[in-house]
Image (tube, coloured by chain):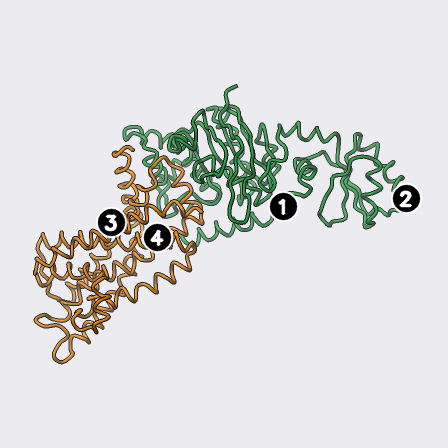
Chain colours: A orange, B green
């Protein structure tokens, strides 16, 4: 296999995703309404709870990294719908009839979803600034945040690719995607600390990759307890590699 | 003549159906070859198998001397493909749609610009290149799709139902392009169609496919003249009509319930009075009579026992195209 071709295929997939975004940025803007509401309504109300939900920080500071990760997940988890749509239209057949390696096409598409997530994240960042939520912003923390965001986008979009291959229809990917967002989101540390959960839920939250994504963002943007990254980053990497590998293996079956 | 494509004993089984059932055929270099048959005959599966998108259960495929099962990526390198449905992304410009595939075919960076310029010119899309493809008309969209398939200068071009869902003007445009392409660059063309008119106009050779099998193959002219005359179609409500007609000559068997019998006659005009007198003598009332030159549909009727149905497929593709417009507008 030609490594140059492999990488250029991946890059092409990602580049054209960005071109589409440039032609029509409206969908990304519309999708930022939901995270905005979480920050403005949920954050403001829960922040007023007596005694506070989290110790030592403004609740909105605690919430912002959670919403950042959540907004990326909510988009990426439905990525497979596009894939099924493109298969139904014929686009996918055309794509796979090129000499480009199929796994490079899948990886490139996941990378594209990761890039798309960056724009999602930028909008949430802007919201955070407008709301006056105090985050630790240094070149390094921003760079780290972008890396985690891209990995989160790749993880959930690859998961969605697997769902698309296994479920075969847009409606089913939509339904299962929606069913999955709930446990991923609520059984994580996105909106409350793991310590506040009952024991059985804590177990779930600790095997939930989203918890590690949220925590690493929180470390970078709020707490600066960097040693936690020693666990978070390897867990995220491992989880991402596993789903990416699975999606690349399953992908061929999508044409049936 | 060198062979551009050779298929031997090809089969593809799905859990409940034999989509392709032990078929063999060959295409010579520079030929336009059509796989003709009704929906669900296995044409698209055959095409995708040759194009290495689907793995066959049995059989051998050789494209320009390359073993397609062993070297799928080399087959894809020299092939162009226009799928049924859409291959254009409406959220990108016409230029970007070509650039995208130029990259995926690994065309060297310094040649890409020139290659795209040529294709745009050939397809007469130069002045609309920077417009979003989603705003193109049906005919322009098809031209862009053909352009995409030419970007790697393929030696063999695969077209899956090239004119399905197009209006008559766009359909004629596609036919002219296909013929011109073969004339100017000698590209071998493999197409599938359920439109016998299309097969008749374009193809040097057709293979008629039904239920996964090839029932007959040959040049359209030969297939039609081998029927041995013209077709006399007689409409009669009498159930005995086919039996009596069989005494006069060959009757094309039909499972359609339209009360029309098709009799092959050598000298059409002269034989009409004799046939009518004969039927009147047997007490058969005739509603209408018509005489026609044999079409590929009659050939299909002879070998498969049914007419090529086409209404459904057209409607479903039109639906898809409309859905695409909604999405991209």
Mark 4, secondary structure of its residue:
helix
What subunit carries mark 1?
Answer: B
Up-down: is A190 above or below B167? below
Q: Which residue, given by chain and number where applicable, does mark 1 sit on?
A: B309
A95 to the left or right of B289: left
Mark 1, secondary structure of its residue:
loop
**Pointers 3 and 4 within a single chain:** yes
Q: Are marks 2 and 3 in contact (CB under 8 Å)?
A: no
Task: Tell me, for residue B282, which label it has, or none.
Answer: 2
Task: Tell me, for residue B51, which label it has, or none.
Answer: none
Q: Position of residue A192 (x, y in %)?
A: 19, 70
Q: Are marks 3 and 4 in contact (CB under 8 Å)?
A: no
**Pointers 2 and 4 within a single chain:** no
Whole-number angstrom distance, CA of label 2 to CA of label 3:
81 Å
Q: Depth-wise, is mark 2 or mark 3 nearer the camera?
A: 3
Q: Residue pushed farthest top?
A: B1
Mark 2, secondary structure of its residue:
loop
Whole-number angstrom distance, CA of label 2 to CA of label 4:
69 Å
**Pointers 2 and 1 within a single chain:** yes
Whole-number angstrom distance, CA of label 4 to CA of label 1:
37 Å
Q: Residue pushed farthest right?
A: B281
A90 to the left or right of B299: left
Q: Are marks 3 and 1 in contact (CB under 8 Å)?
A: no
Q: Are marks 2 and 1 in contact (CB under 8 Å)?
A: no
Q: Which residue, given by chain and number where applicable, does mark 3 sit on?
A: A241
Residue at 60%, 48% in the rendered image:
B311
């Amino acid at each position: 296999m030609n490594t140059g071709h492999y990488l250029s295929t991946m890059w092409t997939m990602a580049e054209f995703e960005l071109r589409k975004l440039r032609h029509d940025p409206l969908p990304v803007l519309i999708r930022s309404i939901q995270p905005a509401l979480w920050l403005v309504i949920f954050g403001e109300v829960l922040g007023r709870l007596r005694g506070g939900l989290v110790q030592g920080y403004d609740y909105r500071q605690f919430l912002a990294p959670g919403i950042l990760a959540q907004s990326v997940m909510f988009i990426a988890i439905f990525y497979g719908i596009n894939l099924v749509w493109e298969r139904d239209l014929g686009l996918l057949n055309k794509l796979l009839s090129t000499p480009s390696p199929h796994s490079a096409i899948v990886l490139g598409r996941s990378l594209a979803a990761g890039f798309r997530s960056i724009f999602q994240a930028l909008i949430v960042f802007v919201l955070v600034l407008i709301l006056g939520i105090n985050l630790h912003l240094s070149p390094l923390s921003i760079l780290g945040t972008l890396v985690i965001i891209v990995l989160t986008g790749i993880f959930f979009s690859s998961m969605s690719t697997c769902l698309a291959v296994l479920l075969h229809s847009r409606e089913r990917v939509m339904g299962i995607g929606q069913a999955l967002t709930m446990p991923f989101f609520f059984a994580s540390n996105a909106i409350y600390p793991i310590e506040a959960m009952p024991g059985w839920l804590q177990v779930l939250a600790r095997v939930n990759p989203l918890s590690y994504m949220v925590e690493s963002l929180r470390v970078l943007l709020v707490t600066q307890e960097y040693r936690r990254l020693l666990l978070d980053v390897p867990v995220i990497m491992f989880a991402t590699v596993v789903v990416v590998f699975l999606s690349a293996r399953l992908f061929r079956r999508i044409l049936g | 003549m060198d062979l551009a494509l050779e298929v031997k004993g090809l089969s593809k089984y799905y859990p409940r159906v034999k989509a392709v059932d032990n078929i063999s055929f060959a295409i010579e270099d520079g030929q336009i070859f059509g796989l003709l048959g009704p929906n669900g005959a296995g044409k698209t599966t055959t095409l995708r198998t040759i194009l290495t998108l689907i793995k066959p259960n049995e059989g051998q495929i050789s494209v320009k001397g390359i073993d397609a099962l062993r070297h799928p990526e080399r087959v894809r390198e020299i092939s162009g493909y226009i799928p049924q449905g859409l291959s254009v992304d409406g959220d990108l410009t016409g230029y970007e749609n070509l650039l995208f595939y130029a990259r995926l075919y690994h065309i060297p960076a310094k040649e890409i610009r020139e290659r795209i310029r040529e294709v745009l010119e050939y397809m007469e899309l130069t002045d609309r290149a920077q417009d979003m493809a989603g705003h193109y008309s049906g005919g322009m969209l098809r031209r862009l799709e053909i352009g995409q398939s030419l970007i790697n200068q393929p030696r063999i071009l695969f077209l899956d139902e090239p004119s399905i869902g197009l209006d008559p003007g766009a359909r004629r445009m596609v036919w002219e392009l296909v013929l011109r392409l073969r004339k100017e660059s000698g590209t071998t063309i493999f197409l599938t169609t359920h439109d016998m008119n299309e097969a008749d106009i374009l193809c040097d050779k057709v293979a008629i496919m039904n239920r996964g099998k090839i029932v007959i193959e040959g040049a359209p002219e030969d297939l039609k003249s081998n029927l041995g005359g013209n077709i006399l179609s007689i409409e009669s409500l009498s159930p005995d009509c086919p039996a009596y007609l069989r005494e006069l000559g060959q009757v094309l068997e039909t499972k359609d319930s339209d009360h029309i019998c098709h009799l092959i006659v050598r000298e059409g005009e002269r034989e009409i009075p004799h046939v009518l007198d004969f039927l009147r003598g047997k007490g058969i009332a005739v509603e209408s009579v018509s005489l026609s030159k044999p079409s590929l549909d009659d050939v299909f009727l002879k070998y498969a026992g049914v007419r090529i149905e086409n209404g459904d497929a057209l409607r479903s593709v039109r639906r898809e195209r409309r859905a695409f417009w909604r999405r991209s507008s």
